[in-house]
Image (spheres, rainbow, N blue to C red):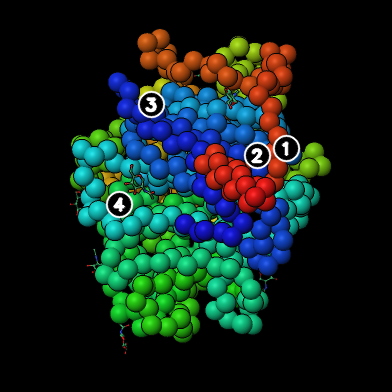
Amino acid sequence: MPSLSWFFFTTLICFLHVALAGDPYVFFDWSVSYITASPLGVKQKIIGINGQFPGPIMNVTTNWNVVINVKNGLDEPLLLTWDGVQNRKNSWQDGVLGTNCPIPSGWNWTYQFQVKDQIGSFFYFPSLGFQRTAGGYGGIIINNRDVIPLPFGLPDGDITIFLTDWYTRSHKELRKDVENGIDLGIPDGILINGLGPHRYDDALVPAGISYQIINVEPGKTYRLRVHNVGISTSLNFRIQNHNLLLVETEGSYTVQQNYTNMDIHVGQSYSFLVTMDQNASTDYYIVASPRFVNSSWARATGVAILHYSNSQAPAAGPLPDLPNQDDPYLSMNQARSIRWNVSAGAARPNPQGSFRYGQITITDVYVILNRPPELINGKWRTTLNGISYLPPSTPLKLAQQFSIPGVYKLDFPNRLMNRPPKVDASLINGTYKGFMEIIFQNNDTTVQSYHMDGYAFFVVGMDFGVWTENSRSTYNKWDGVARCTTQVFPGAWAAILVSLDNAGIWNLRAENLNSWYLGQEVYVQVVNPELDQKEFPLPENAIYCGLLSSLQSEQAHKFKFSGAPSISKKHRRILIMLLLILLGTFIR
Ligand SMILES: *[C@@H]1O[C@H](CO)[C@@H](O)[C@H](O)[C@H]1NC(C)=O
Ligand SMILES: *[C@@H]1O[C@H](CO)[C@@H](O)[C@H](O)[C@H]1NC(C)=O
Ligand SMILES: *[C@@H]1O[C@H](CO)[C@@H](O)[C@H](O)[C@H]1NC(C)=O
Ligand SMILES: *[C@@H]1O[C@H](CO)[C@@H](O)[C@H](O)[C@H]1NC(C)=O
Ligand SMILES: *[C@@H]1O[C@H](CO)[C@@H](O)[C@H](O)[C@H]1NC(C)=O
Ligand SMILES: *[C@@H]1O[C@H](CO)[C@@H](O)[C@H](O)[C@H]1NC(C)=O
Ligand SMILES: *[C@@H]1O[C@H](CO)[C@@H](O)[C@H](O)[C@H]1NC(C)=O
Ligand SMILES: *[C@@H]1O[C@H](CO)[C@@H](O)[C@H](O)[C@H]1NC(C)=O
């Protein structure tokens, strides 16, 4: 991970691994606040976690209990969401507006959840107000338990890589533009781990930009966990002269195949094994390029460096080739080639494919059509099936808990209705233990990704054109990969199957921030009618807002923030000792 000059000391104030009678607990203490950095040579206010951007990696193992005390040092409300963490029976911890009241500026809130029965590579990010475009994100690694072998040799290193389309405008300016229907335009750059491009071309990249260098040893094999946490740009990822052996995506081990490059859409995560099998005559370029765009976007190319310890020269030559930008079938075929390794174990020792999703009867079908932004009642909004979701001021979960009527309706339509678009809080009424088929039909002109909280779903098919019942004959009913974010190409559809076994109210959203921000989301309510299998109770520390704000008392634990990185206790002690020594010399 990058060691940035403005970042002083490490971030986990406490990392305890207490082996109690049950599953272990791990504690994190995170201060979220603005820091100043210039990833593209222009000074910006960026959201850091404990002074770090990207934030610290949450590195945990299946079934661990995670406790994270989040202090909001921003000047606006905050929620962190854990993209891909399933929070079984515990949507109270999901960190989106339908499940939680936002943490007010200057307050803290402690999340607690168990990473139950899952493995894989995910990330967290601030879910409100376009904040993700200013940072605040970091990696989540959920390791296999020791008793369950990995379906590949233990890698010699584990490296997280964040790719983001980046603008020098602040998140507040960007969200204002989106509200006003202004296209965000070409990104000012693509960041790799929060850093700008290597100066591979003097004409395109100004001098003085610091870039990511990944140091490796010849002959070793590393696991690269690569995430696109950007706003709306699909990115093509590749490493000069090196193969990417795909092994995992968003919690599922895949059939292991080599790729020379991979299209990673907004919100998606992949693990690749990369073997350092070159003779290190030079360093090598690591590249992330905007996909399906014209040549004027080339100036926004992300470039980092892969540096062998015995490298003899800087990286040289042209950047590795991009696939044909005008052939979307290439990308669709690549997506279709990603398959589940049905014989590998994952969170449990039994094969991933022991859940025979292709043989289960479908109980509900939703064909969900998205449209590009349009004016509804004079405001720019995006819709799913003609409905633009507007979060009620009272979170859905609290309204459900306190039986407050009228906050939301369970009437989200199965298909686009023949009626004008509207703004509403309309939910999908999921059937507990039902098996739902969702077809996303993308009527926009750009790639969109859709993500579901609380679940992994099977991606069983995608194609260009309009989905019909006959499209089902093309479904992969055997080894479609289970993941939590699927891309949907423009003018195309993607079909997913999901087993509704996780009670709660779960967010289903566009990962593309501009689409999401203008209303492209819906929640799925899943109620378990059996009492003994109930969801977790309302957390004791729940924050109240909206119609329930009278239940909330002023927070006792107020604290002061400075923009500067916090100094750990150990370092404070060292500082005090230094001061005392200095004082001592003076007195003498
Ligand atoms: C994560 O923690 C495990 C120990 O639980 C350690 O072996 C591994 O190296 C850590 N991974 C990273 C990326 O820090
Ligand atoms: C805020 O943090 C303090 C400890 O710093 C903790 O005791 C308290 O429970 C936290 N508040 C909430 C609402 O989580
Ligand atoms: C699938 O997983 C098994 C079991 O771990 C492993 O031995 C095998 O190599 C994997 N197969 C492919 C094609 O990746
Ligand atoms: C992937 O490519 C590497 C060379 O980079 C090769 O050694 C390996 O056998 C290939 N693996 C597969 C599954 O094709
Ligand atoms: C290895 O290095 C030599 C020069 O030392 C170069 O000619 C050759 O092309 C290199 N091979 C590879 C695979 O990079
Ligand atoms: C290239 O794309 C940008 C943004 O999508 C657009 O503004 C511009 O007009 C396009 N240029 C050409 C030559 O098509
Ligand atoms: C929601 O679905 C459940 C069955 O899963 C049903 O009992 C209930 O009446 C439905 N509610 C509404 C408002 O449609
Ligand atoms: C979606 O797009 C297709 C092709 O552009 C068009 O024929 C169709 O009318 C659109 N549907 C809606 C509901 O916008």
Whole-percent x, y for residue 114 in the image: 41, 29
Q: CA distance from mark 4 to mark 1?
A: 40 Å
Does 122 sit above or below residue 170?
above
Q: In the rendered structure, which amino acid carries the disc numbered 3?
A: Asp
Disc 2 is placed on an element classified as: loop
Q: Is mark 4 within 8 Å of ligand 3?
A: yes
Near mark 4 (Cα within 10 A), the count class, few <14, some 14-19 or many ≥20, is many
Tag in front: 4 or 1:
1
User: How far apart are labels 1 and 2 at the CA level?
Assistant: 9 Å
In this rendering, which labeled residue sits more in front, label 2 or label 4?
A: 2
Decide: few, some or many residues near mark 1? Use Cα within 10 Å; few <14, some 14-19, many ≥20: some
Sequence-first tag of 4 and 1: 1
View quadrant of ligand 5: bottom left
Residues at discs 4 and 1 in contact (Cβ within 8 Å): no
Name the residue that disc number 2 marks: 128
Instruction: Mark 1 or mark 3: name the one nearer the start of the chain.
Output: 1
Disc nearest the viewer among 1 and 2: 1
Measure the C-alpha gap from mark 1 to mark 3. 35 Å
Where is residue 356? Give x, y as percent: 25, 37
Where disc 4 sits, the SS reads strand
Q: Which residue is mark 3?
A: 501
Q: Judging from the image, what secondary structure is the residue with disc 3 in?
A: loop
Residue linked to disc 1: 76
Mark 2 to mark 4 CA distance (whole Å)? 32 Å
Q: Residue at x 55, y 31 (%)?
A: 69
Nearer the observer, 128 or 416: 128
Q: Please report contact status of discs 1 and 2: CB closer than 8 Å, yes or no.
A: yes
Disc 3 from disc 2: Cα separation: 27 Å
In percent of width and height, residue 287 lies at: 48, 69
On residue 254, the disc is 4
